[in-house]
Image (tube, rainbow, N blue to C red):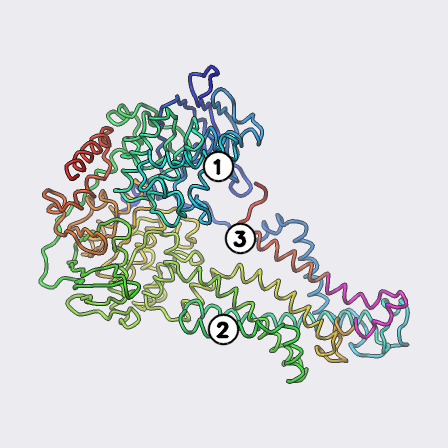
């Protein structure tokens, strides 16, 4: 670190305002936000999407996205206003003294270069180090970040390492010039809980060790509780509340903050109905895979009863979505069969009757790609009505309006809109309406809430719960988010590498004794307690000591 | 659900109403006003060509192949651009040329897009063997240089207008096929197509209602470009004597017929060539603007 007298604050943002372009006019997307950050401190920025978190994060580097401009305020980094600096001067700061870790490491690495070459590029470019030293430093950092095979992993290409490892490599890359400030923009959002915990621990250790200041941007409250010393809650580009983490958690002042804190409290109100003799859906000893050699699903058996929610839980790659593909008939199983209402369903969806297809509907994770952007909401929801039920004219129109009301969207406003004009949550609601329109008995929900903000996701879960009671629907909920499972499931199926390791009612699965994998999953879900990560890591170290 | 319940739910996080609607017509007018100068110029060129093509008989007192005077007359008040090698009015021929060359090029491009677009979408949606067979046929067609192949086929089948249109359309549809197949591929893998398949929709619905609207922007842009190529190819063929046959007025053959004048320093034979060049430039300007708009590219940064 340099010897010149340091100002008290490494980063001092005063009255920052940022405008975004919308068509012809400029709208303010960040309004008069001020905060300070000392060395060694971690600041958590939380808020829903569109709250301006990332925009503020980028502004801390003196950068505004295309279509945005910094319209007012000062960004003092180590006493220098970044807004006054010229392009070249800012460029020499970025990477060297301020680093940025993006949400999707997979999209941020160049797939054509080895990790270590991309690592060394920055210090060499900034003239801080030469290639040989930088490579040595990379291996050193990989070791510190507890990456497997630190000596050789750098020589792999990005697609040859896992998502969690890539995210850690990205953190290492951000550290390559020993920056004074690192901005983490949702670094763990795309990761499984079991991987997330490692990345979180790594980030915290590194920040402590190098006395780096950091801004941690996330929408996950439990994560921010572990990571930051101080939290700022943002909404619509305005600072709602700022406090030290412990104070903020124990005693939030503003209503909005309280509502964010209360989100995780939703649980299903009703008891599941009694099992009927014949389950609605039976997945009977199914083995399936995409190639003839490797099986993604190995001898899977479970049942879904009418009016029940079955949650299928597991990490990415555990075969959850493949199970859905087998049920819907997109993938033919190698062995086993799918029974619907006691009757075997043809394996291929093309051989199923219209009525069989109607009974099982699907809601997807990404509502953006699940609805045709060139169709109006009317046509999206109306198509199953005319296709399956043969509705026309007034009845057709009337039913679309009913469905829109059912998903709590005003028919007069929304019926003639295109999906592009809707928010993420609204689009997901439209997908729900489309599934409902077919009047199915089973709806498969594939990670329906994981792309949504917590408040919005909560709204969707409540809606699904209400619809289930109204229409006695069965849900198969595919998710990696255990909070969702706790909220809505009646039964839980835990999957690991294509096999079911545990299944049963929610209470049996979630209360001890667990299968060891269930235990690992459950214990990896961050809790709001700021000491959770420390305790967790301590207990993990102990167990691994015991084993070795 | 009661009024009150809707009210409260509207306050929930994702019930914010979208921005007010603007009509398609207003939007189009706004876009046009914001269009760059080059695009406006291009549009002007295209509009004036269409005008000339449609109203050719009204704009000139002479017939298309009517001999009105001496051979190779100078420019004067009666024959504004003089006469050609057979004594026909040059301006009249130029106006009718717009009708013939542009009209035929337009029809040809449409046919090419019909063939290429449909087969490209089918290849993408069906995949497997259909895709393999169609793609390999296209590979074979593309392996032979287009102009030479066209010359060959025209010599075999003769040079009537329908034959000309079909041959060029088939040869050009290979390029359209490749584009349509590539862009359809990106759409076919989306969840909404999967959801349509699972609904049990027919091939026709999937291709026309689900896929086609989403591949329109690149196809429309390509239409402009392909139109230019087809247009140039027809003119080229006519120049070589295998395109539109006399006495039909055509810009390509007009250049050839009057080429001798160039030796005497007269630029009249170059006017049809200039007309071809101007239209090509105009169409390209418009296509550029359209591509820029639909691909979401932004200026600067």
* Image: magenta residue range: B255-277
Q: Is residue A9 above or below residue A69?
A: above
Q: Main secondary structure of the magenta part?
A: helix
Q: Residues within 10 Å of mark 1 (few under 14, many from 20)?
A: some
Q: Is residue B120 left or right of residue A455?
A: right
Eye-nearest disc, 1 or 2: 1
Q: Chain of mark 3?
A: B
The answer to whether residue A52 is visible is no
Q: Position of residue A278 (x, y in %)?
A: 11, 64
Viewer-closest of A127 and B278: A127
Q: Position of residue A462 (x, y in %)?
A: 24, 46
Considering the image in quadrants, where does the N terminus of chain A appear? top left
Q: Chain of mark 1?
A: A
Q: CA distance from mark 1 to mark 3?
A: 39 Å
Residue at point 34%, 45% (across, down): A163
Q: Secondary structure at mark 3?
A: loop
The part of the image, by quadrant, that contains residue B105 is bottom right
Q: Which residue is mark 1?
A: A131
Q: Chain of mark 2?
A: B
Q: Residues within 10 Å of mark 3 (few under 14, many from 20)?
A: few
* Magenta residue check for A71: no
Eye-nearest disc, 1 or 3: 1
- Precedes in sequence: disc 3 or disc 2: 2
Eye-nearest disc, 3 or 2: 2
Numbered label attached to residue B295:
3
Viewer-closest of A396 and A466: A466
Q: CA distance from mark 1 to mark 2?
A: 48 Å
The answer to whether residue A42 is visible is yes
Q: Which residue is mark 2?
A: B136
* Magenta residue check for B259: yes
């Amino acid at each position: 670190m340099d010897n010149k007298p340091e100002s008290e604050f490494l980063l001092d943002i005063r009255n920052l305002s940022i405008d975004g372009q919308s068509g012809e006019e400029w709208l303010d997307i960040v309004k008069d936000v001020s905060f300070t950050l000392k060395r060694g401190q971690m600041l958590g920025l939380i808020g829903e999407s569109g709250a301006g978190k990332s925009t503020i994060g980028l502004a801390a580097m003196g950068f505004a996205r295309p279509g945005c401009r910094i319209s007012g305020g000062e960004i003092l980094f180590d006493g220098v206003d970044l807004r006054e600096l010229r392009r070249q001067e800012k460029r020499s700061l970025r990477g060297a003294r301020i680093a940025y870790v993006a949400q999707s490491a997979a999209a941020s690495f160049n797939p054509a270069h080895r990790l270590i070459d991309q690592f060394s590029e920055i210090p060499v470019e900034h003239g801080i180090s030469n290639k040989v030293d930088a490579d040595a430093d990379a291996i050193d950092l990989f070791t510190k970040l507890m990456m497997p095979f630190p000596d050789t992993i750098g020589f792999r290409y990005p697609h040859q390492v896992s998502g969690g490892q890539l995210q850690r490599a990205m953190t290492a890359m951000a550290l390559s010039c020993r920056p004074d400030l690192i901005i983490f923009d949702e670094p763990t959002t795309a990761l499984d809980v079991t991987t997330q915990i490692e990345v979180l621990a790594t980030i915290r250790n590194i920040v402590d060790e190098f006395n780096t200041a950091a801004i941690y941007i996330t929408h996950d409250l439990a994560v921010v509780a572990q990571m930051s010393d101080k939290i700022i809650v943002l909404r619509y580009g305005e600072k709602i509340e700022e406090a030290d983490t412990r104070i903020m958690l124990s005693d939030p002042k503003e209503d909005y903050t309280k509502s964010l804190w209360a989100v995780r409290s939703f649980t299903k109100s009703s008891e599941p109905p009694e099992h009927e003799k014949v389950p609605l859906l039976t997945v009977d000893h199914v083995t399936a895979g995409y190639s003839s050699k490797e099986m993604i699903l190995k001898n899977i058996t479970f049942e879904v009863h009418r009016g029940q929610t079955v949650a299928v839980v597991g990490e990415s790659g555990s075969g959850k979505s493949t199970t859905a593909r087998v049920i819907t008939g997109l993938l033919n199983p190698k062995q086993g069969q799918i029974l619907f209402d006691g009757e075997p369903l043809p394996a291929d969806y093309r051989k199923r009757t219209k009525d069989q297809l109607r009974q099982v509907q699907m809601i997807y994770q990404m509502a953006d790609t699940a609805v045709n952007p060139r169709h109006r909401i009317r046509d999206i929801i109306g198509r199953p009505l005319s296709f399956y039920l043969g509705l026309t004219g007034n009845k057709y129109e009337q039913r679309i309006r009913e469905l829109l009301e059912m998903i709590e969207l005003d028919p007069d406003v929304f019926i003639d809109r295109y999906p592009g004009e809707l928010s993420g949550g609204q689009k997901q609601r439209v997908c729900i309406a489309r599934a409902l329109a077919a009047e199915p008995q089973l709806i498969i929900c594939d990670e329906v809430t994981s792309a949504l903000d917590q408040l919005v996701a909560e709204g969707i879960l409540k809606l699904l719960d209400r619809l289930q009671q109204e229409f006695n629907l069965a849900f198969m909920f595919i998710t990696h988010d255990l909070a969702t499972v706790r909220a809505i499931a009646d039964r839980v199926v835990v999957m690991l590498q294509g096999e079911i390791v545990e299944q049963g009612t929610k209470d049996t699965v979630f209360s001890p004794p667990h299968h060891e994998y269930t235990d690992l999953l459950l214990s990896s879900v961050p809790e709001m307690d700021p000491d959770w990560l420390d305790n967790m890591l301590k207990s993990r170290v102990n167990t691994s000591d015991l084993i070795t | 659900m009661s009024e009150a319940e809707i009210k409260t739910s509207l306050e929930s996080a994702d019930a914010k109403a979208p921005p007010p609607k603007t009509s398609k017509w207003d939007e189009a007018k706004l876009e046009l006003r914001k269009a760059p100068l080059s695009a406006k110029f291009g549009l002007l060129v295209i509009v004036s060509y269409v005008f000339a093509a449609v109203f050719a008989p009204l704009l000139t007192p002479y017939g298309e192949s009517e001999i009105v005077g001496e051979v190779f007359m100078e420019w004067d008040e009666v024959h504004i651009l003089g006469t050609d090698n057979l004594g026909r009015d040059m301006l009249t021929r130029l106006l009718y040329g717009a009708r013939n060359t542009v009209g035929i090029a337009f029809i040809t491009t449409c046919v090419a897009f019909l063939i290429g677009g449909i087969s490209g979408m089918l290849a993408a949606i069906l995949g497997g063997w259909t895709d393999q067979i169609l793609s390999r046929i296209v590979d074979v067609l593309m392996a032979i240089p287009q102009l030479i192949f066209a010359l060959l086929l025209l010599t075999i089948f003769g040079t009537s207008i329908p034959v000309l249109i079909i041959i060029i359309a088939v040869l050009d549809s290979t390029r359209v096929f490749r584009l349509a197949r590539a862009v359809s591929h990106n759409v076919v893998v989306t969840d909404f197509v999967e959801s349509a398949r699972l609904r049990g929709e027919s091939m026709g619905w999937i291709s026309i209602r689900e896929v086609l609207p989403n591949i329109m922007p690149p196809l429309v842009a390509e239409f402009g470009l392909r139109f230019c190529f087809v247009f140039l190819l027809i003119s080229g063929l006519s120049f070589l004597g295998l395109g539109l046959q006399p006495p039909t007025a055509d810009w390509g053959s007009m250049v050839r017929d009057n080429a001798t004048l160039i030796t005497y320093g007269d630029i009249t034979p170059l006017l049809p060539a200039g007309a071809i060049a101007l239209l090509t430039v105009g169409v390209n300007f418009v296509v550029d603007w359209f591509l820029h708009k639909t691909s979401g590219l932004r200026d600067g940064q």
